[in-house]
Amino acid sequence: MIDFKKITLSDKPIIDNCLKNNIFRTCNFCFTNLIAWQAKFKTCFAVVDETLFLRYREENGEYCYFSPIGKMPLKESLALIIKDAEKNGIPLIIKVVGDQMWDCIEHEMPNTFQFSHDRNNDEYLYLSEKLISLKGKKLQRKRNHINRFKAENSDWNYSPLRTVEELQECSAMLNEWEDLNIGKAETSLRYDYIAIKTMLENFHFLQLCGGIIRISGKIVAFTIGERLTGDTFVVHVEKAFGDIQGAYPIINQQFVEHEISADYTYINREEDMGLDYLRKSKMSYYPENLLKARILRLK
């Protein structure tokens, strides 16, 4: 049986060591997401032979695993979680298995698993250059929103998110945003609030990158992300006041232009959680690819 334990902030170095050579663009292979969503998923981990094992619990009580990642041969590591599930008397369920990972698993253990598609956890992958230029007819509306924002707010400015004071301002803005949207948000977005607070309070420890938009000196939008793989940056957070026309499109565009584009080809903007308005928003940027999320079970 694998000796799983709850993830804490102090576990970042050992988990990062397992993820340092990660090539999979799935956002769950990222310490920030694992710790920030701890309140919802109660994620536990173990490291065996420099290989990371992850198990979490859905809100319905169902235990699930992520695919192991690290130095151990995949067939050997998968055998360990099959054995762990058996000893714990739980069904083996491996979630958020993308195309790359599925190909590796099927190659190592052909005809062992069956899968279903979990559309709500598909991740949205964009070309960074397209999020900056917003070229083409399809993205004309995004350009229009940004142009209107600039026309209506001559005193706006963008800057990187860096100082403790700026982080505190973002936290205050998040509280204000929450007050404005209270009663409207789905349960999943209550955990989203906790996750964002965790990132803001531990921003420098987690080695995150962020950006802010101000109007007349007040923060009206902010975003947070970090390196995911050698060619992919993941955006964890994007918050703006919805009544300010163009605030969301401009923080999106400015952040990629100033903080990301020089180093990363792709931007992972994570999943839509099955929320219609999030799906509509993410699809409106016409992703380069949807990273398909599979749920694996033993045949």
Image (spheres, grey):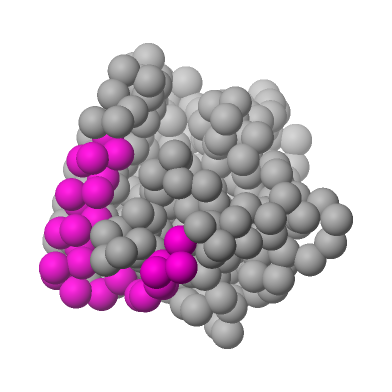
Comparing 77 with 201, the one in front is 201
Residue drawn where x is 37% and y is 24% of the image: 185
Say whether residue 173 is magenta.
yes
The magenta region covers 153-178
Comparing 289 with 154, the one in front is 154
Q: Residue furthest top?
A: 60
Say whether residue 91 is magenta.
no
Return the x and y of residue 89 as percentages of the image width and height: 37, 19
User: The N terminus lies in which quarter of the figure?
Assistant: top left
Q: Which of the 4 image quadrants contains residue 167? A: bottom left
Comparing 95 with 272, the one in front is 272
Return the x and y of residue 252 as percentages of the image width and height: 53, 60
Residue drawn where x is 47% and y is 77% of the image: 259
Return the x and y of residue 222 as percentages of the image width and height: 37, 58
Return the x and y of residue 183 as percentages of the image width and height: 31, 18
Task: Answer whether residue 72 is visible to the viewer in this image.
Answer: no
Residue drawn where x is 26% and y is 45% of the image: 174
